Image (cartoon, helix red, strand yellow):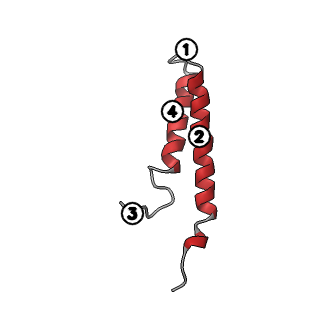
Amino acid sequence: MKQTSIYHPIGPVGSILIGIVLCVLHFAQVFPGLWAIGMVGLAFLLGGVIMLMVRIMTQNKNKLPK
């Protein structure tokens, strides 16, 4: 499957959504003894944001002249 958009759901947007879900689970105290779920959620969230920023910044550099 060819990725035609920088917002493809498998890439950074999916990582951001997983991070948001894990952070919500942490703050809702669904798993009260598992404090690391919030840290993992934060890591997914920040990693997805960094990946998305890199894709946006390099988007115009990948286009070849016709």
How far apart are the two marked residues, 3 and 1, measured between alpha carbons? 41 Å
Residue 7 in percent (x, y) is at 50, 56
Residue 53 in percent (x, y) is at 63, 55
How far apart are the two marked residues, 3 and 2, measured between alpha carbons? 24 Å
Residue 56 in percent (x, y) is at 60, 61
Which element is circle 1 on?
Answer: loop
Which is more N-terminal, label 2 or label 3?
3
> Which is more foreground, mark 3 or mark 4?
3
How far apart are the two marked residues, 1 and 2, measured between alpha carbons? 21 Å
From this view, report whether residue 27 is shown above or below residue 48: above
Amino acid type of the residue tagged 2 in the rendering: Leu
Which element is circle 3 on?
Answer: loop
Which is more N-terminal, label 2 or label 1?
1
- Which labelled disc corresponds to residue 2? 3
8 horizontally vs 42: left or right = left
Which is more N-terminal, label 4 or label 3?
3
- Which labelled disc corresponds to residue 45? 2
- Which labelled disc corresponds to residue 32? 1
Which element is circle 2 on?
Answer: helix
From this view, report whether residue 5 is shown above or below residue 49: below
